[in-house]
Amino acid sequence: MNVHFRVFLPATASFLSEVDLAEPAAAQVEALFRLGYFEGEIVIAEPDAPPFVIPGALEAWAQNLCFDAMTRALAGEGSHFANFSGPGGVAVAPEGDRVRLTTDGGATATFPRDTLAPALVACGGRILDWARARKSDDPTYLANLDYIEAFRRKAEAALT
């Protein structure tokens, strides 16, 4: 299973992958810093299946989907989170050793809990680490990431 994120760059109306974001061009760095938050998508990919794509504000998805929903799913609890930056949301329903994700638009996919949870938690961690580095001079933004870190710690503890 591969879970990764992509950031939407309005200046070029394109998505930047995690690989692109590791060494962005100078113009991209400047454009990314000007954004108040990072719009993009989380992509869950498994061999022989179409990718499951969840668009929206990445900071909110890190907190709500990658961390909080996985903490709940590992405890056998379902959840639903609205998309912070647009319409729709995602429902997360544990089903035995699997987890079903359903968007408000009707897309549904079921994944093994023991591979989905660590992959989503790791992706959320990469989102926070990348965002923190990108906006290191923005104390208000960093305070929001500090808040989200508490969800990350709970999710990491739930994995063990």
Image (cartoon, grey):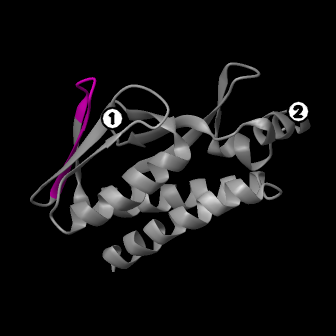
**Residue appearing at x 54%, y 49% in the figure:** 59
Please give the label number shown on residue 102: none
Query: Could you say where residue 129 lies in the image, as x and y percent from the top left?
Result: 65, 61
142 shown above or below 61: below
Q: Say left or right for 93 vs 155.
A: left
Indicate the secondary structure of the residue bearing disc 2: helix
Q: Main secondary structure of the magenta part?
A: strand
> What is the residue that sits farthest to the right in this orientation?
26
Residue in view at x 9 percent, y 59 percent: 96
Q: What's the amino acid at mark 2? A: Ala
Q: Which residue is mark 2?
A: 27
Task: Assess disc 2: are there few (<14), some (14-19) or many (≥20) residues with their C-alpha within 10 Å of its C-alpha.
Answer: few
Residue at 40% x, 61% y is 67
3D distance between C-alphas at marks 2 and 1: 32 Å
Position of 151 with respect to 79 (left or right) is right
Q: Is residue 37 one of those drawn in magenta? A: no
In the rendered image, the vertical position of residue 58 relative to residue 39, given as above or below: below
Closest to the camera, between mark 2 and mark 1, is: 1
Residue 99 is inside the magenta segment: yes
Part of the protein shown in magenta: 98-108
Examine the image and state in which quarter residue 125 appears. bottom right
Measuring 43% from the left and 61% from the top, which residue is drawn there?
121
Q: Is tag 2's residue or tag 1's residue first in the polypeptide sequence?
A: 2
Q: Amino acid at mark 1?
A: Gly
Q: Residue furthest left?
A: 96
Residue at the spot of label 1: 89
Residue 84 image point, x, y percent? 46, 38
Q: In this orientation, which residue lies closer to the viewer: 49 or 121?
A: 121
Q: Tag 1, which secondary structure?
A: strand
